[in-house]
Each structure stands twice: as structure tokens, then as C-alpha cells.
Amino acid sequence: LALFTILRWLIQTIVLPSDVFGWPPGEQDTIRGSNNAISILFSISLCHLLLTLLIQRVGSIVPSEKITDAPRIWQNGVNASLDFCTGYMIYDSIFDILVPHRFNLMALPASAWCFLAHHMVTSFCMVGCRIVGAGHVFCMAMMLIGEFSNPFQNMFICMERAIGLGDCCTGYWVLHSYRYVQLSYAVVYFTCRIIIGFPVAFYITYDLLLTKQGRDNVPVGVSMLWMVAMWGVMIGSIPWIEDSVDMMYKFRDGEEIKGYLANMDEL
């Protein structure tokens, strides 16, 4: 939490307002842009760690595995990934949702409540697998699927903010690469959620609820709560899946995507 807070301050007060980027200090776009930058750094770091851990034991792990069945050094890596992600969920809930609304829960729009609920559910699952001593593979798989598209999303949101701020913050590369970054996000998000996400979610559900190892290692009641949380997030992502498909069609037709940043700023 302290690391993210310090990095956010550095990006908001030094990096973005520097001569290199030229963002106006203290402006709302600069503040929100620093949050986008932190999200990019977090996702890249977390996905690198998760991919390294999962690739090391691919083919030998299942979602209901007990963490004590893994090598000790691998357990340390898993614990680090869970702690890192939980810390970011807390940070993002505070600085990207609660602080902009001065901690007035009654003032939060529906979209902000959805993000807050997502962060709470994610943290609940990660803390739960630490307590149960199993289910960490389930959390790692869903973290990777959920965060892999995040750098692309926040990159094109940052670029959209820069374009909106005008000539002070926009260069040749921003104007000419914006649509391609946007397309990259749409393709990666659709792939992660539909092509990879839903089959993985079905497999996790099968392993935790319908296999003897799953029922022995994780209490059925806990697995049921996890499945409600996981499927709630997966089904809740359908509007963003539809957005990604719309982006791909509009890119094909040479149209610009309008209004995405406005929707994000409702948070």
C-alpha cells in the first residue's frame, strides 16, 4: 500500500507534469492519469510473477491443490502474489474510488460500487485461500485472466486523456498509435474473458465442487462462496466484453470510439 502511494505521488507531481509529458499539475486528468499509470505498473508486475509461477508447474497443479503440496520456494512466490494483489485492491479502493468522493459512500455511482464490490470479492477470495490452505491456484488463474488486459486498457485511457488535454500533452506517437493500442486492448480483453476465462472458470468449478480432492481440500461452503464471487465477476464483465467487440468492429470500419473515458470518469 505504501509503495503504490509513493509511486502515485511521484507520477502525479513529478513525472506527468515534467517537460517530457507536459500534463498540467493538479488537474483532475493528471490525478486520474497517475492512477492509470500505477494500474499499469501493478498489472505488469503481477502478471509477470503469476506467469513465472504457473509456467514452472504447468501440468502438475489443479485449482484445489493444497499449498503445502508445492515446493517451499513456490509457496513463497504464491504468498507474495496474493499479498501484492490484496495490497493493490486496498490501495485502488481508497485512492481511485473513495478519495475522489471524499469517502462519502452515498455519493458513489453504481459503476463505482461495482468496482468496489469487485475489489472486496477479490480480496475475500485471496484471504480465504490463505486461511483454508488451498485454492491458491484458483486465485492465481483468475488474477492472471483479470489483469492481463489491464495495461492495454489503462494505456489507451492515458492516451485518451492526453489527447483531451490538447497540444501540451499530445505528440505524434500518441495520435497515431492510439487506435492500435485501443484495438490491442479489445483483442486481449475478449481473448482473456471469452476464449480463456470462461473455460477456465468452468474447469475451476468442476475441480472444486465435483471432485473428491476439491471437496476434501476446500470446504464445500467456501467453494460455493468462491464460485458465486467468480461467476459474478465473469458475468459482470459482459458489458466490457460487448465494448471490446464494438471496438474491434469500429476499428475495422475506420470509426473512432467515443465516450469510453467519460464512462470511466463516472467512478
Image (cartoon, rainbow, N blue to C red):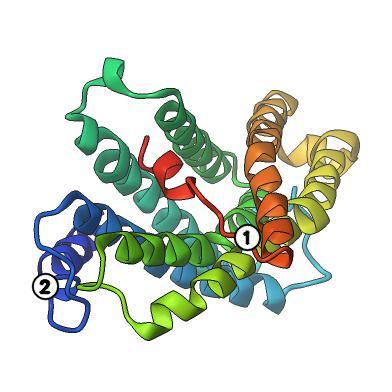
In this view, the mark in front (1 or 2): 1
Image position, residue 105 (x, y; %): 28, 20
Q: In front: 139, or 236?
A: 236
Task: From the viewer's perspective, tell me whether residue 72 is left or right of residue 159.
Answer: right
Q: Quadrant of the C terminus?
A: top left
Q: Amino acid at mark 2?
A: Ile
Can you identify the residue that label 1 sits on?
A: 255
Q: Is residue 100 above or below residue 143?
A: above
Can you identify the residue that label 2 sits on?
A: 14
Task: From the viewer's perspective, tell me whether residue 183 is left or right of residue 80.
Answer: right
Secondary element at tag 2: helix
Query: In percent of the image, x 68 and y 27: which residue is there?
Result: 228
Query: In percent of the image, x 25 and y 44: which residue is there?
Result: 95
Q: In front: 24, or 175?
A: 175
Q: In front: 96, or 202?
A: 96
Query: In percent of the image, x 62 and y 70: which residue is there?
Result: 184
